[in-house]
Amino acid sequence: MILGVTLVVFFLSHVISDPIQLYLSPKNAGNPAAIAALRHAYGLDQPLPIQYVKYLQGLFTGDWGYSKLAGQAVYPAIAGRFPTTLELAIAAVILTIAIGIPLGIVSGVSNGKMADHLSRIFAIVGVSLPVFWLGLILKIVFFYDFKVWGLPSLPSGGSYDVLLADSLGWHPAITRIPILDAILSGNPTMLVDTSAHLILPAITLAFISIGNITRIMRSSMLEVLRQDYITLARSKGLSERVVIYRHALRNAMVPTLTVSGLIFAGLLGGAPITEFIFQWPGIGQLSINGILGGDLSLVLGYVFVTTIIIVVANLIVDLLYAYMDPRVRL
Amino acid sequence: MTRLSQSSEIEAAGAVESGEKPVLEIKDLRVNFQTYAGVVKALDGVMLRVGKGEALGLVGESGCGKSVTAATVEGLLPDNASVVGGQILLNGVDLLKKTKKQMRDVRVNDVAIVFQDPMTFLNPVLTIGTQISEVFDMEEEVVDREAAKILQEEGHASTNETSQNASVGAKRGKPKRALRKKALRRLSVEAMTKVGLTDPERLFDEYPHELSGGMRQRAMIAMAIARNPVVFMADEITTALDVTMQAQILDLLRTLRREFESSILIITHDMGVVASICDRVAVMYAGSVVETAEIHEIFNKPLHPYTQGLLKAIPHVVKENETLDSVPGSVPDLIYPPSGCRFHPRCSYAWDLCQQQKPPHIETQPGHWVECHLYKEEKKSDR
Amino acid sequence: MVAELRYALHLLTLNKLVLVGIGIAVTLTLVAMVGPFFVPSDTPIKLNFATGEAAQLGNPQISWAHPLGVDTYGRDMLNLIILALGLDMGAAGLVVGIGLLIGVLSGAFAGYIGGKIDELIMRVTDIFLALPLFIWAMAIAAVLSRNLNSLILALATVSWPGYTRIIRGQVLIEKGKPYVEGLQALGVSRARILIRHVIPNSIFPLLVQATLDIGGVILTIAALTFLGLALNPLIPELGALVSAGQTYIQINPYLITFPGLAIVLVSLSFNLVGDGLRDILDPRLRR
């Protein structure tokens, strides 16, 4: 499966466009002799299958080519930015689950009533919003308008205030995750700062995911509540609360959690647009810069990473499924 | 409730003569369902009496309203159903007038129901043990008593202390919870043994899909008897089982009846089941009970034309070259039911009155009720 | 049968939102198709830098002549949105259409024939499913030329796997039904059975998904054009409009609100319709 993906990526990179682009660093760009030498060094003058093998080798050893935009090799460039994306992804997922799941439960349980209708409207609107627009609108309100109205405004970009950090001599060095590092290094000012920066992008991302989760939670809740064993549970005289929480939820959670896992995996891909709007220095933003700047190797490296993440996530989700549903056990 | 009775089932059946107060009495129950094809008049004046300790069979074709009746008693009707008339008296108290919360108590203590298909009626993600325990969990005193017993056995306290601490609620913290769990487990295991489940300790921790059909059915029965209900309703519980398992389950029911003296309502379409365990039988057709009588009466002297047709349709094991009679026609549409007596289109004795008026529920002989214009009241019937 | 129809209709009316959704979707489609005829044909090219600059400096220029204001080049916003709607909705339609075509063919084929071919097709489908839609489209757009057509192509190539899965599942179900066996016994060719009988019966879930997808694809197209992947500021495009107005949001938020709202409306309406369809098709046992 992964092999298949690499095949496709390889196809794109080596067959469609001139692969030498992948390996040229600026200094060699204008020099035909150097280009020829590079071609030979990278085996680009050899037949395609061999090139493919070499490509695979490169992938495994971390040699993903050189990014002219980042001014460094692709792999460390991506790896370096990953923790920041991780922070955003985790924050968004936490928000999504914390709001989406209860909303879905309420919606499912009170099917047809006002609470249900409201939740559904909320969810559908959430799913219909373009990410970039939502981000911009939030920026307008919370950043610009707040300032105008004299309210403490949320920062508009970046994951932390670099100037402030410099003045404090602080640097996210431990885990490279800004908010975590602020906690770990016991720096309250930076903690506030990193949190403030985190809020808007996280909400933007979460808004849409919440829409999804709510719908799935609702429909699986409805499905479960129709089941016979729920009737039996009620016939035992159990209170409605117990019926819902002990009997219904256990069953209804399964599809929801698996979807959450997939959402998380998707978010790990960096939600490029959100990162772009909020200048969040993660791998998403990196990929966009790469695309706009025509930095092919960067982009391909990114595609590879995200695809791997999704495949792995799928595997984990399958395992999780087996864990939660005793019927599926090995 | 657990007094062991030496009397045979027939003796216990003598309980319902006219005048004797029945445990469960359904009077003129009418239930409608709101559907997109129209209003389904599912129950059209059901009259039913179950005496203390007796086993009443409720028979009829699919769709005649047997399950709906049971569901109404248990208070488990779906949202689109509405009770439009009648009473359900449990020891004289009208269940239909109870609030939701009160009904929950009723479900815990008084009326239990076991359903047909144990696979779909058991929660697949919870262990059997959990599902049985939660029934006991509703009764504080029972759990506390068991917990006290455990403490006594483990010699943790002298007799005085034990009785004082009998309310486990008095204790706090971890030991209390673990104790409770133990108590629940023992109670459940005890119930499982009573229904004939072998190796209950192991089964306690297993999941429904790991058990066989017969075992699951027993587990469901365990959940029902756990509360020593006054009335025990069994809705087609043998239908999904093969013949041997069927026999075992019926045996189990007989034993339980002797032990607990609960009244049992056995819903089935299988006359064989009725013959083997019931004291009396009520025959339902299209939303009403058309005939009720003791089992011998029904088989030897069926009064209602439908009952007669039903019995004629049963093949005799011994007879050869028998043509199977069946009741002509098919089950009526309950959205636009036939006027008057709902059976009249299929009845060979029908005449004008049958089309105009629904026959009253009358007692032609002591203990034998019919709804048919062919018969006049011989005794003054009581409501 | 009558009961079923009545039930379906009742469900529709019950969910007023769906009706709203259908209403909006139909209106928008009409606007997109017919509107351009009412828009002065030189709108996209008629640049009026004076008013454009005014808009950039914070004067949204909302008036009867310009009910939605004016964009950064001085063009009338309403006209632009009408034109852009047509373009974007058309693009989305194409993406979904092509995706459906490929998906239905491959999925039905795979499901019906079964065996090795089925496995092979499903493997390929899985691979494409694993690719993150958005990223992939970006990548392809980056590699190929940067215009709307390559975008459409890129998106279509990643959207078909979903349909393949759906229809394959449906076909498998249909295959097991007795009428197929009957037709085969009569000697009807497999292809004919597939095209004339099996596929029409499997269409419903596809329709639902396709409707929902139009909503989703519109968002993706908007996002991609927002990032500037289909350069050419003269072509009116919802995402591009938002992008152009980005730098001025502090002073003139209208530059992004109206195009954005248009996107939301389109997406919302199709999502509502798709949701409603799904509700109707859901195997509801009672109410």
Image (cartoon, coloured by chain):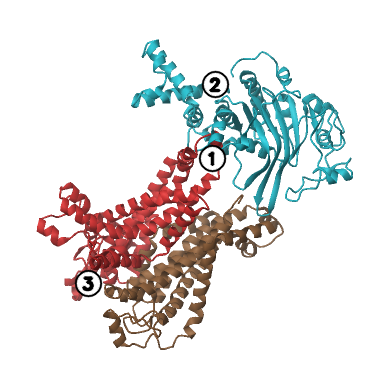
Q: Residue at x 17, y 60 (%)?
A: A161
- Residue on which disc 2 sits: B193
Q: Nearer the viewer, residue B82 or B147?
A: B82
- State which chain disc 2 sits on: B
- The chain letter corresponding to cyan is B
Side (left or right) of A273 relative to B51? left
Chain A as rendered: colour: red
- State which chain disc 3 sits on: A
Q: Nearer the viewer, mark 3 or mark 2?
A: 2
Residue A287 visible in rendering? no
For label 2, the crowd category at 10 Å Cα-Cα, with few meaning under 14, some 14 to 19 and many 20 or more, is some
Q: Specify the amino acid type for callout 1.
A: Ile
Horizontal and vertical percent position of residue B201:
48, 23
Q: Specify the amino acid type for callout 3.
A: Ala
Q: Which mark is residue A230?
A: 1
Residue A3 visible in rendering? yes
CA–CA distance between discs 1 and 2?
25 Å
- The chain letter corresponding to brown is C
Q: Residue at x 34, y 72 (%)?
A: C226
Numbered disc 1: secondary structure? helix
Q: Residue at x 44, y 76 (%)?
A: C85
- How many circles with numbers are drawn on the protein? 3
CA–CA distance between discs 3 and 2?
84 Å
Q: Which mark is residue A36?
A: 3
Horizontal and vertical percent position of residue C203:
58, 62
Q: Nearer the viewer, mark 1 or mark 2?
A: 1
Side (left or right) of B39 relative to A237? right
